[in-house]
Amino acid sequence: MAVSLFELFKVGIGPSSSHTVGPMEAARRFAGTLVKEGLLSSVGRLKVSLYGSLGATGKGHGTGPAIMMGLEGERPDTINPEVMPARIEQIRNCGTLSIEGQRAVRFRENTDLVYYRRKSLPEHPIGMTCQAFGRDGQCLYEKTYYSVGGGFVVDATADGTLKVREDATPQPYPFSSARALLALCREHELAIADIMYANEQAWRTQDEVRSGILALWQVMRECVQKGVQHEGELPGGLKVRRRAASLYRSLMDKQRVDLISPSLSALDWVNLYALAVNEENAAGGRIVTAPTNGAAGIIPAVLHYYWGFCPRADEDGIVRFMLTAGAIGVLFKENASISGAEVGCQGEVGSACAMAAAGLAAATGGSPEQVENAAEIGMEHHLGMTCDPIGGLVQIPCIERNAMASVKAIDAAIMALRGDGKHYVSLDKVLHTMRETGRDMLDKYKETSRGGLAVNIIEC
């Protein structure tokens, strides 16, 4: 299956790609079908049922508001997060929403949005069923969707199984493993970024690929800028204090740069970049899934490190970084998972760390073998990481976890660049291990808030 970089990196809103971006897109598809099939005039009521991780943590992840906006025809990449709260409040007050902006239909959140905290659909841990009822109470149309991580949405067939739409677009350099990718690099004497660049041109022109990447980079920069401006507490009830703004002021005043060692001052900035992005994500702001919202701060933080601290950094390096990170992301998407509800946080933060490490190694002149080694190091040391958000919110431990993984990605790139690319454990083996570890992991550690810190914090 062909996967584009622009599927892995998408502009959306926080706090979760699988629980916010995906459900919004699924709801938008459902509403679009009602219009397309000529059913809209007959609809009297809508109902959405949420299952598995979506039912267990959807309230904390902002799933309900996202679904309501999707039913009104909004898209994750274009919706204005600043006007969204007022519209949600209006829907709650009047008990109706406007399907694709065309017709008002009854929708009462407390009865028409159902969270099944202990019930799952068989095909995937993040599932939702949308139903449209006529004025007589009969179901006019029903559709099940699965949000499979990173904002990807898969329709269910009539019998409820996943309907995977495989993109069969022919690519000049197809690959499905790190081993195959490295073989292509050696055979054609190309860098990993070159391979990915050529493959992306199966969908877009060379200029469109480059401009699209730089547009994503601009959204990441704007996210950091907003993150260092906003203060106060994050929404959700945990009263988590936003730290990026105060950290930014202290760094600008050079009050804490040498807290540990002047030589480590860059790490303060890396922490700042990651915190800024993930605080914006937790507040429902505009971010880039990279490859998920829960891990959205890692690649921007490492990109900012490259831009601000690496000699001879330029836009060509940004493009190489993103293309390389995208190639590694394709391997995760095809061979393992980027869904915390499926394999735990190793699939989110672990994959983002590997992608960032590979991107940084490539942008600073690493060989394909060194790039693959950097990705392997980044992922290997996140194996077994659980997804246990306190209160179902993408705040603790998620925000700090992004900062830690950003530093680990930089260190992984440094370690790989100091070597010759030869190493004992391959990226393919680590991917296989991650997938198997995810299967063995108890469900309570996979984005259900029923294990780990999510429950033990109460006892502390």
Image (cartoon, helix red, strand yellow):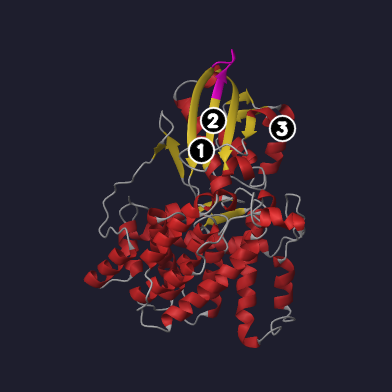
Q: What element carries label 3?
A: helix
Q: In which quarter of the image is residue 232?
A: bottom right
Q: What kind of element bears circle 1?
A: helix
* Residue at 74% across, 58% down: 240
Upstream in the sequence, badge 2 or badge 3? 3
Q: Name the residue under label 2.
A: 130
* Residue type marked 2: Cys
Report crowding for label 1: few under 14, some 14 to 19, many 20 or more residues within 10 A (C-alpha): many
Q: Is 135 inside the magenta-drawn segment?
A: yes
User: Residue 362: percent from the left, percent from the top?
Assistant: 40, 73
Q: Is residue 143 above or below residue 388?
A: above
The foreground one among 142 and 312 is 142
Q: Is residue 454 shown in magenta? A: no
Q: In this view, does 453 lie above or below 158?
A: below
Quadrant in which the C terminus is drawn: bottom right
Residue 28 in the image: above or below residue 399: above
Residue at image point 67% right, 48% down: 82
Q: Do the residues labelled 1 and 3 touch (CB within 8 Å)?
A: no
Residue at the disc numbered 1: 26
Q: Which mark is residue 92?
A: 3
* Label at residue 155: none
Of circles 2 and 3, which is in front?
Answer: 2
Measure how far apart labels 2 and 1 are at the Cα level.
Answer: 9 Å
**Cα gap from disc 2 to disc 3, whole angstroms:** 19 Å
Query: Badges 2 and 1: C-beta atoms under 8 Å apart?
Result: yes
Q: What residue type is labelled 1?
A: Ala
